[in-house]
Image (cartoon, rainbow, N blue to C red):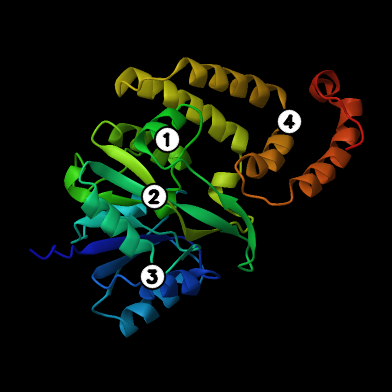
Amino acid sequence: MKQKIPLVTIIMPVHNAGKFLVPAIESILAQTYARFELIIVDDGSTDQSWKTIRAYKKRYPKTIRVYRTEKQLNSAGNGATDVGLSHAKGEYIARMDGDDVALPKRIEKQVQFLQDNPLVILVGTQADIINKNGKRIGTKTVPTTNSAIYESYGVVHPIIHPSVMIRRSALPNRDKIYLHKWGINDDYYSFFKLLTYGQFANLPEVLLRYRIHGTNASLTNVKEKFYNTAKIRLEAMKYFNYQMSIRSLLVMATQVVLVTLLPSRFIEYIYPIVRGMDRTPQKRLRAYMAKLKKLAISHPVVRKYTVVGKL
């Protein structure tokens, strides 16, 4: 018996992504998997994004549906994603950001994986990191198996958010993914809850180009976001029965100490390196250490806990 070809809804929240929106949309239209609808939700943009969105809607009226919010619902695009979900027809829901690029086989491979693995509720991918000009500057690597992903949730977010595809029938609410409690970190919190409804996986292939352009919400105020993630882990243990290993507890405790002691600017420099998102860590570290030497004279925390020397 021939396997049914499911309809996929790809939801793209957009907020002032005008500079990168065309390659993002074109990468979806170029997918090898044909049975999909693209829902674009303009999340209170003030640039030319809405004009671009309407132009694509006019060109592809059977494939693209568009919606618009009066103001930005939140910085992560999760509110806009749930707006799109309430209008979605697909059996599988794929998330896509308006400044990233999907590789041609992304949707095809994720659909096939969900078809072959009925216990999996969410599947992501690996990602190359690109800059504002589209040049590859690093790789974002995440674990692939459910057990490894579950373990990793205690120390880091092991899912690349704009790469995910979700089995809609397994959601506790078919028209809502996010819990809308933790702002930019809400996908981390919401996915913690989804862990209780099914297995997670990440494909081993790079199927997304994740763009860093200087205004990514996830790469600013890193110290504050870390404290949020620590609180989320504790809530997950309390409310979602997340079983954190001793190793993860020790790692988290170490993270808390380091983030508390180190200056915010150092953390924002080191974060892309630690996450494998920058291929030139020595260059970045040397640039920062030059600034750190100046800080050492007047900053008591740096003077006490940092050894400044030649790299």
Left or right: where 48 falls relative to 181 = right
Label 1 or label 3, whichever comes before in sequence order: 3
Note whether 76 is above or below 233 in the view shown: below
Gap between marks 3 and 4 measured at Cα: 40 Å
Q: Is residue 90 above or below residue 125?
A: below
On the image, numbered disc 3 is attached to which residue? 28
Front label number (2 vs 3): 2
x, y percentage for residue 194? 29, 36
Q: Marks 1/3: CA distance?
A: 29 Å
Along the viewing direction, whichever of 96 and 182 lies nearer the viewer: 96
- For the residue labelled by badge 1, is the local secondary structure a helix, a strand or a loop? loop
The disc at residue 263 is 4
Q: Label 2 crowding class (10 Å Cα cut-off): few <14, some 14-19, many 20+? A: many
Q: Position of residue 56 (x, y in %)?
A: 37, 79
* Mark found first going from the N terminus, 1 or 4: 1
Q: CA distance from mark 2 to mark 4?
A: 32 Å
Q: Distance from label 2 to label 1 (Cα)?
A: 21 Å
Query: Hey, which quadrant is residue 308 in on the image?
Result: top right
Tell me: 90 left or right of 293.
left
* Identity of the residue drawn at 25% across and 37% down: 198
Which residue in the protein does label 1 denote?
182
Q: Amino acid at mark 2?
A: Gly
Q: Image point 46% across, 60% down: which residue? A: 15
Front one among 56 and 269: 269
Between circles 1 and 3, the one closer to the viewer is 3
Label number found at residue 124? 2
The three-letter amino acid code for the residue at tag 3 is: Ile
